[in-house]
C-alpha cells in the first residue's frame, strides 16, 4: 500500500509541475492602449495636426489646457468649432482617434 501511495503522489506532483510550467509559457494578452475622451474648441488645424483648447481630463489628472494632437487623417473642421474627441498616446505623442463637431 505504501508503494502505491508513493507512486500516486509522484504522478500527481509531476502532473502539477507540468501544468504550472505550461501555464507560465502561455502568451499574455496585449495591454490595450487607453483611449481618453474630452471636449474642447479647435484653435488651429493643419493636415497633420489639430490644436484644441480642451476641458479638464480627469482620468489623466489634466487641468484645462491647449495642446496639439496628431491627426491620422484629414478632417473637415475649422478653427472655432466645438468638438468632442478621443485620443491615445503612442510613440510619437498624442493622436486623435475620433473628432466630432458639437452643434
Image (spheres, rainbow, N blue to C red):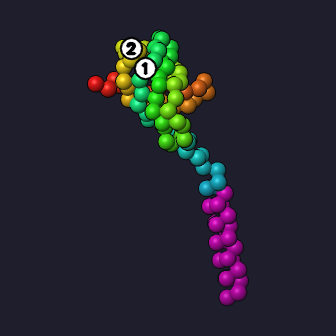
| Residue at 43% across, 20% down | 42
Figure quadrant of residue 74? top left
Identify the disc placed on residue 42.
1
| Marks 2 & 1, CB-CB < 8 Å contact | yes
Which residue appears farthest toward the top when viewing the image? 47
Q: Position of residue 7 (x, y in %)?
A: 69, 77
From the image, give the main secondary structure of the stretch colored magenta: helix
34 up-or-down from 98: above or below: below
99 up-or-down from 28: above or below: above
| Residue at 55% across, 27% down | 94
Identify the disc placed on residue 26.
none
Provide the residue designation for mark 2.
78
Q: Is residue 3 covered in magenta? A: yes
Confirm whether residue 29 shows in the render: yes
Badge 2 or badge 1: first in the primary sequence: 1
The residue carrying pointer 1 sits among few (fewer than 14), some (14 to 19) or many (20 or more) residues within 10 Å by Cα, namely many
Name the foreground residue: 77 vs 35. Answer: 77
The residue carrying pointer 2 sits among few (fewer than 14), some (14 to 19) or many (20 or more) residues within 10 Å by Cα, namely some
Q: Position of residue 36 (x, y in %)?
A: 47, 36
Residue range corresponding to the magenta coloring: 1-21
Amino acid at each position: 500500500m505504501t508503494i502505491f501511495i508513493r507512486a500516486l503522489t509522484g504522478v500527481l506532483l509531476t502532473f502539477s509541475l507540468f501544468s504550472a510550467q505550461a501555464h507560465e509559457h502561455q502568451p499574455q494578452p496585449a495591454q490595450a492602449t487607453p483611449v481618453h475622451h474630452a471636449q474642447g474648441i479647435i484653435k488651429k488645424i493643419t493636415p497633420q495636426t489639430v490644436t484644441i483648447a480642451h476641458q479638464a481630463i480627469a482620468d489623466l489628472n489634466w487641468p484645462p489646457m491647449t495642446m496639439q494632437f496628431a491627426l491620422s487623417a484629414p478632417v473637415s473642421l475649422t478653427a472655432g468649432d466645438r468638438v468632442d474627441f478621443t485620443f491615445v498616446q503612442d510613440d510619437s505623442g498624442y493622436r486623435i482617434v475620433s473628432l466630432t463637431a458639437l452643434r
